[in-house]
């Protein structure tokens, strides 16, 4: 009896010792290593990029899946990073780290490796050969399903920017979280315009079979044009949030040639927005590395068909001087004008920035707008932000700014008319004075034309029906 008690006490002390130390873990690892000697294993690589430098979507889904496994915390080492929120801590695999998983009773190992030749990363799946036929395909389908669910739950929009040097393991793109707060609901735009844009985007997302039946690539192209400060960039951000698409912002000044532009497009993913800002300014440059033909092929050439469910967005200050080949239906599906601020937009800004729906100064502001004066929404918004503690002071500051703009426009108009009359009546001036006067007239015309843009209030900002009809005629 005493011997039995001592035996039980000894076993208890041994188990307690094993539970307080890593000896049990060490013995388990030794047993698994010994067991591996008696099995033949099959390995599969999942590279980050293919031979054409296109991103492998399976790589990202495997990464998402593995980083969600509880066994990641049980690894010998791993990386800790701050998440999208400051109080979030996330774990990430490191190079040469091994993580174990089980599926349908079979054990599999994953290792992340880096190529010695080009520095690209790859995942290596290792499983027993006698389990291969039974679990390989179901296991990969399981990974895809779990990864898609995780992405939908933790969707984080990213902004990708192209870099000049292709060095490194991540190709030509660098990404950061895209946390722009703009939405289609908060933008100061015509309500009918916003509803039509929403309807157009929603219809696009549901039109995969329609595009395939027509034999067309599943993409949609938008042109946003208007003066600086009218909200084009905020509209792009709002579209990205509405679609939950990543944004690829292409800086054409960092593109070396036409082939480089094609390679950038190949490295983008499906379900993304591809943005090219200030395209008109780039096309007006006499010395540029990307040709007009390269731009056209980028917009709707064969290379643009390598990927689906994409939205392309191009912004311009003005489309008047742009080659019509760039703007034709098929390359640009929807044209949206962003005008300078009018009284209706001003009231929306006052409501958003100042919380004011009606004010005794509104009639005076409306009268000034009717006189042809205007500012961009960004300029008016900045005045309101600076004076948001006093709505009355903010509105008076806006009135002063509008009056200054209006008086400048009238003064330029008068000087322009005087210059024109002098030039028409004087036929015998010398060449030097004529050049000087022509130069002044050109400058006045340029400034007058810019200021006059504020009075163009009747143009329809978005005409989806007419654009679609033109596209149909073109394809026919």
Image (tube, rainbow, N blue to C red):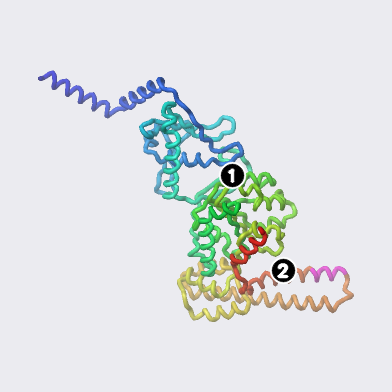
Q: CA distance from mark 2 to mark 1?
A: 41 Å
On residue 267, the disc is 1
User: Relative to residue 13, is residue 80 drawn left or right?
Assistant: right
Q: Quadrant of residue 11?
A: top left
Q: Quadrant of residue 26?
A: top left
Tell me what residue is drawn at x 51 percent, y 79 percent.
361
Please give the residue where the numbered disc 2 appears in the rendered image: 446
Residue 85 appears in the rendering: no
In the picture as drawn, the residue positioned furthest to the left comes out as 1
**Residue 338 x/y as whole percent:** 60, 66
> Magenta region, mostly helix, strand or loop?
helix
Q: Tell me the element at label 2.
A: helix
- Asked whether the residues under the numbered discs 2 and 1 touch, taking CB atoms below 8 Å apart as contact, a structural biologist would say no
Tell me what residue is drawn at x 52 percent, y 75 percent.
395
> Magenta region: which residues?
431-438
**Residue 162 x/y as whole percent:** 60, 47
Quarter of the figure with the C terminus: bottom right
Tell me what residue is drawn at x 49 percent, y 61 percent.
183
Q: Is residue 162 magenta?
A: no
**Residue 15 x/y as whole percent:** 24, 26
Q: Is residue 261 above or below residue 375?
A: above
């Amino acid at each position: 009896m005493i011997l039995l008690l001592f035996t039980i006490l000894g076993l208890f002390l041994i188990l307690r010792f094993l539970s307080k130390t890593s000896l049990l873990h060490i013995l388990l690892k030794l047993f698994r290593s010994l067991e591996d000697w008696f099995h033949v294993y099959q390995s599969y690589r999942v590279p980050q990029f293919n031979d054409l430098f296109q991103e492998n979507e399976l790589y990202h889904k495997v990464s998402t899946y593995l980083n969600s496994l509880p066994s990641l915390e049980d690894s010998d080492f791993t990386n800790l990073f701050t998440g999208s929120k400051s109080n979030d801590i996330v774990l990430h695999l490191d190079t040469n780290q091994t993580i174990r998983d089980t599926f349908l009773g079979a054990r599999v190992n994953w290792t992340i490796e880096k190529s010695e030749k080009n520095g690209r990363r790859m995942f290596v799946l290792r499983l027993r050969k006698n389990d291969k036929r039974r679990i390989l395909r179901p296991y990969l389908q399981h990974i895809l399903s779990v990864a898609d669910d995780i992405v939908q739950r933790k969707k984080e929009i990213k902004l990708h920017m192209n870099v000049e040097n292709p060095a490194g393991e991540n190709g030509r793109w660098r990404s950061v979280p895209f946390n722009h707060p703009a939405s289609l609901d908060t933008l100061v735009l015509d309500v009918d315009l916003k509803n039509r844009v929403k309807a157009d985007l929603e219809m696009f997302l549901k039109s995969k079979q329609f595009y395939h039946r027509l034999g067309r690539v599943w993409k949609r192209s938008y042109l946003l044009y208007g003066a600086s400060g009218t909200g084009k960039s905020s509209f792009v951000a709002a579209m990205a949030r509405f679609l939950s698409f990543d944004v690829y912002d292409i800086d054409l000044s960092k593109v070396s040639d036409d082939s480089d532009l094609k390679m950038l497009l190949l490295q983008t993913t499906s379900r993304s927005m591809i943005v090219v800002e200030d395209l008109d300014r780039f096309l007006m440059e006499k010395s540029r590395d990307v040709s007009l033909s390269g731009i056209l092929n980028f917009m709707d050439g064969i290379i643009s068909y390598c990927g689906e469910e994409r939205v392309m967005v191009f912004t311009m200050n003005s489309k008047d001087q742009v080659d019509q080949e760039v703007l034709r239906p098929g390359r640009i599906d929807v044209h949206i004008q962003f005008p300078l601020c009018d009284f209706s937009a001003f009231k929306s800004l006052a409501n958003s920035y100042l919380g004011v729906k009606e004010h005794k100064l509104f009639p005076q502001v409306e009268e000034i707008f009717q006189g042809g004066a205007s500012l961009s929404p960004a300029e008016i918004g900045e005045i309101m932000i600076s004076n948001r503690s006093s709505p009355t002071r903010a509105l008076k500051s806006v009135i002063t700014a509008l009056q200054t703009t209006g008086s400048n426009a009238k003064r330029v108009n008068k000087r322009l008319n005087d210059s024109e009359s002098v030039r028409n009546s004087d036929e015998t001036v010398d060449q030097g004075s004529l050049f000087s006067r022509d130069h002044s007239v050109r400058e006045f015309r340029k400034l007058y034309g810019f200021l006059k843009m504020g009075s163009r209030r009747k143009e329809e900002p978005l005409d989806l029906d007419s654009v679609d009809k033109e596209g149909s005629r073109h394809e026919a």
